[in-house]
Image: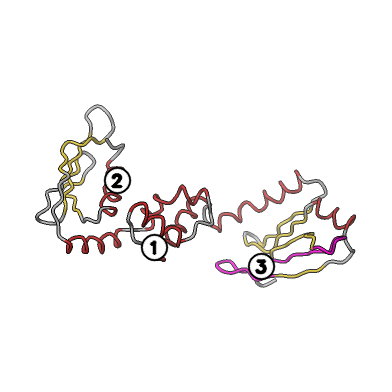
Amino acid sequence: MFSSADAFKYSIWKYAVAHRFDYKLERNCKQRIVMKFKARRCDFYICVREHLKVDVMTVKEFREEHKHSVGDECQAGKWGRRRLRAKLLASLIEEKIRLSFDYSPMEIMKDLKLELGIMLSYIQSWRAREYVRLLVMGKAADQYKLLLWMCAAIVRVNPDSRAFVKLDGCKFKRMFVAFGAALNGFILGCRQMLFIDGTHLSRPYEGTMLAAVALDADNLIFDVAYATVGGDQ
């Protein structure tokens, strides 16, 4: 039983890729789906229909017998690689990426090979990971809309903090953040000297991130404030 036609096609896709066979949909609509193996001698067949009373798809006929050659498997392997689109792969790895954003493309390749027998290229794994990150975090450009709210929240919940963002119309210019605890720590427990350094930010938005640090009583680095400025600042 499947919740929808799309859920059935997604399950068949996973099954076909894992078992290395190519298939075709002889009939494909919301009420009835018929799937067969492409090899002429293979009797694999499944038919699902829409339930009359419940909004689900139920299996009406299923033949699991496979008859195909090594050549069919090799051809299916090429087909499987073509069908491994980022959106489909993302559904297989979404939970793991939500648990760990450091989940690397190499780890994705290894896990899918062990769990489902799916052979991926590095670029396929990377695209799938980026697709999931986009779903979870949203577009990077949309995060700029939260900066005014973030600065107001920092000042509101952290006493003695300083945070502001400057805009040129709707264009980001610069942002400065210094938490109250860091400012008080600098005044009360650090040498009265600031060291400022910056690093360039990579694409797509570029700019420079600046940091102000000091030395505490143990000659250790103490973070005081940081800022982000546009590329032309």
- State the separation of the CA atoms marked 3 and 1: 33 Å
Which amino acid type is marked by label 2?
Answer: Ser
Q: Earlier in the sequence, mark 3 or mark 2?
A: 2
Label 2: state its secondary structure: helix
Asked if 96 appears above or below 122 in the picture, the reply is above
Q: Position of residue 33 (x, y in %)?
A: 20, 43
Looking at the rendering, the stretch of residues picked out in magenta corresponds to 199-220
Per the image, label 1 sits on a secondary structure element best described as helix
Q: What SS does tag 3 mark?
A: loop
| Residue 131, above or below 48 | below
- Which is nearer the eye, 20 or 1? 20
Q: Which x, y percent locates residue 118?
A: 33, 57
In front here: 149 or 73?
73
Residue denoted by label 1? 124
Q: Residues within 10 Å of mark 3 (few under 14, many from 20)?
A: some
Furthest residue to the top? 53
Tell whether 161 sits left or right of 153: right
Q: Which mark, residue 230?
A: 3
Residue on which the image places disc 2: 11
Q: Residue at (74%, 61%) from the top-left corner?
A: 226
Which one is earlier in the sequence, the residue at label 2 or at label 1?
Answer: 2
State the CA–CA distance, disc 2 to disc 1: 20 Å
- Nearest the eye: 203 or 170: 203
Q: Name the residue at 30% across, 47% down.
A: 10
